Image: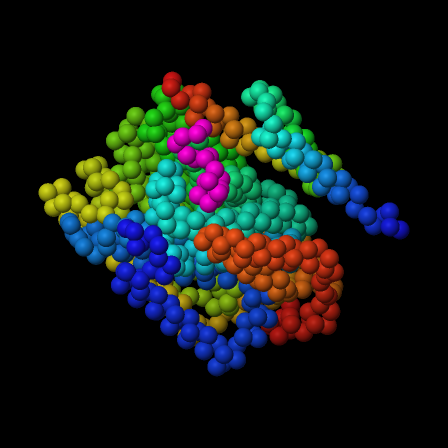
Amino acid sequence: MESHEQQFLILNEPMIVGAMISIVVGALSLFIGITYFKKWGYLWREWITTVDHKKIGVMYILVALVMLFRGGVDALLMRGQTAMPENGLLDAQHYNEIFTTHGVIMILFMAMPFIIGLMNVVTPLQIGARDVAFPRLNSVSFWLFAVGTGLFNISFIIGGSPDAGWSAYFPLASLEFSPTVGNNYYAISLQIAGLGTLATGINFLVTILKMRAPGMTLMKMPMFTWSILITNVIIVFAFPVLTVALALMTMDRQFGTKFFAMQDGGMDMLWANLFWVWGHPEVYIVILPAFGIYSEIISTFARKNLYGYKSMVISMVAISLLSFVVWAHHFYTMGHGVMVNSVFSITTMLIAVPTGVKIFNWLLTLHKGKISFTTPMLYSLAFIPIFTIGGVTGVMLAMASADYQYHNTMFLVAHFHYVLIPGTVFAVIAGFHFWFPKVFGFRLNEKLGKLAFWFITISFNVAFFPLFILGLNGMTRRMYTYSESTGYGPLNMLSFLGAVGLGIGFIILVYNLYWSIRYSPRDETGDPWDARSLEWATHGPVPFYNFARIPQVNDLDAFWYAKKHNKPLWSGPIEKIHMPNNSGMPFLMSGAFFGAGFCLVFSWWIPTIIFTILIFVFMALRSFEQDHGYYVSVEEVERIERELGGEK
Amino acid sequence: MMKQLFPKQHVMGFVFSMVLSIVALAVLAFDMSYKMGMAILLVTAIAQALVQLLLFMHIGESEDKNTLYTNIIYALFVGVVTILGTLFTMIWGYMY
């Protein structure tokens, strides 16, 4: 224990040393490769300094995919450890670290960036805009998120990972019980990434409210854009709570304050309270965009307009309000009285109502539709029944008195994986397949896509359904081992096999990416799915200015209407286009954030202060910078349009 | 010329917010009753919020009043729910 606390580099775990070596080797070969192929300039000009919402979106998704595998390896290790009774793959400490990082990474560094990535790529296109409202801020958001991710991920080789659970409850997460720097990493990396998310929230809120194409009233927006609007409202109002809570955590751990202490007027439970005041809306931040993605995909591949558009919008607004009044259901058993639990029990069950409305809307959209079973559609169809299992078990957990039985058992673990995986993960994968041709100009292979789908869907159920039964049999979450006499062995082994299947499914998904890049036929139309909303009206891949002329919108599903009635979306001549300049400042400033964060983790005050001053220097430079963007001339636009195969 | 260029509002706002922070800090530095301290904190907190909203976020300058009011109402809803809800779960309703 003692040696564990003091280490800077973690050298007493062969697995971590192995990971360390492979990271160093990987980074070195990447560096040599980029240098050898002389790609540094390309990387800097085209990606690192970019303010283009599509490229930023692609980078978000790239990081999310990498994190999916990092979190997935954590999951495989956990399932591997519990596959047999009294297994010795991981020790207790390592297991604690892994379930903590699995949770944090999957929610905050996989689900969030995947969704933010898709929303970056799609939203401006869907509303007929040329970029987001604040392109430079968008780049800042991405790089802050990226350095937050980096900071969190280096924790397991430098200093040790956080080990108090992804919810980092006090008093366990306090300096007294978690003396390593792990939870400092937790607080500071989430803080930095959270700043980026907050800026994204404001950015997209303004974009959607102010930059819609002429004629697109709020009630003519595509459903995905609606879901993003609501999501960003929740982000803007929920994330400040996390910011404050994390700041208090940092002060408690590093400056000796007592906000969450058990004595001197502090209150340890206040952390759980604040965490879930943010945490429950966060659940809806990752699920509402998923609902938007499914709405788009289901109506596209059922060849029908979305059933109950208005009720969809109303239920999303209702969810956004209700999401703020249910948080205490995460700690029913913390000892409050019957009244508090009853109130939160009722509000929690209320959320099932608007969610149910949405399920029926999707079913009725499918009703009598001409359904084509493409890969994204398969994910959407699988989502409905699987998510319903997650939802129904959620209502079981919502009943406070019954929850005393389920609380912190594997039943809960099964429940939230049954909502988050078909809800968020299936949705982002479906959206990934659906919008891929828009960004890259070719579709992912359908055969491989479907193979991955069946692997993922079946293995998911094999991995998580047994956990319901294990939970009811009394297996608690986060236990790193159990004795054979408990009888948990066989079901845990089954779950492990499912986890392996899930891993294979995701590998097929990535192989599909590789295969399609090499061999997939290129799409010339820009509308490979015969889809409905504005993003399909322009070329694929989308030119950097998105639309040569801004479309005029008269209807919901404007592009579909234009196709069916042969009505042009555009009129008037091409005009010169105003575009924002690239900038390296967001990247450099985020680098300063990384330095400040890293030094703060280890309480190295002088370098922390120097890096913080550097951050302010970058902000000051930005304040005095004159940057009015540039114009793309009419001739240039016409030339690009001709090259892309005719004006759109 | 200099008069137009000088960001008078912002400097004023900055000074105000500094003064308000120092006054709030004084609650800690000087020995006073709990009620007195709380009263000072509440007043300075509200004044601080107003300074931020009016002088830095230019809340009065928006033409789109509907968006503004929707925003304020939503913010109030979330704020009130968070604060009163926390008091409700952690203190008032704790034993009932």
Above or below, comparing residue A590 to residue A512 in the picture: above
Q: Position of residue A248 (x, y in %)?
A: 49, 40
Q: Position of residue A330 (x, y in %)?
A: 37, 34
Q: Nearer the viewer, residue A45 or A172?
A: A172
The residue lying at 28 percent from left, 51 percent from top is: A1
Above or below, comparing residue A343 to residue A80 in the picture: above
Q: Nearer the viewer, residue A100 or A126?
A: A100
Residue A340 located within the stretch drawn in magenta: no
Q: Quadrant of the C terminus of chain A?
A: bottom right
Above or below, comparing residue A164 to residue A392 in the picture: below
Going by the picture, which residue comes out furthest to the right? B1
The residue lying at 34 percent from left, 69 percent from top is: A21
The residue lying at 34 percent from left, 36 percent from top is: A394
Q: Nearer the viewer, residue A275 or A431?
A: A275
Going by the picture, which residue comes out furthest to the top? B96
- The answer to whether residue A66 shows anywhere in this view is yes
- The answer to whether residue A569 shows anywhere in this view is no
Magenta region, residue range:
A248-265
Residue A252 located within the stretch drawn in magenta: yes
The residue lying at 51 percent from left, 31 percent from top is: B82
Q: Is residue A197 left or right of residue A178?
A: right
Above or below, comparing residue A174 to residue A56 in the picture: above
Q: What is the quadrant of residue A541 in the picture?
A: bottom right
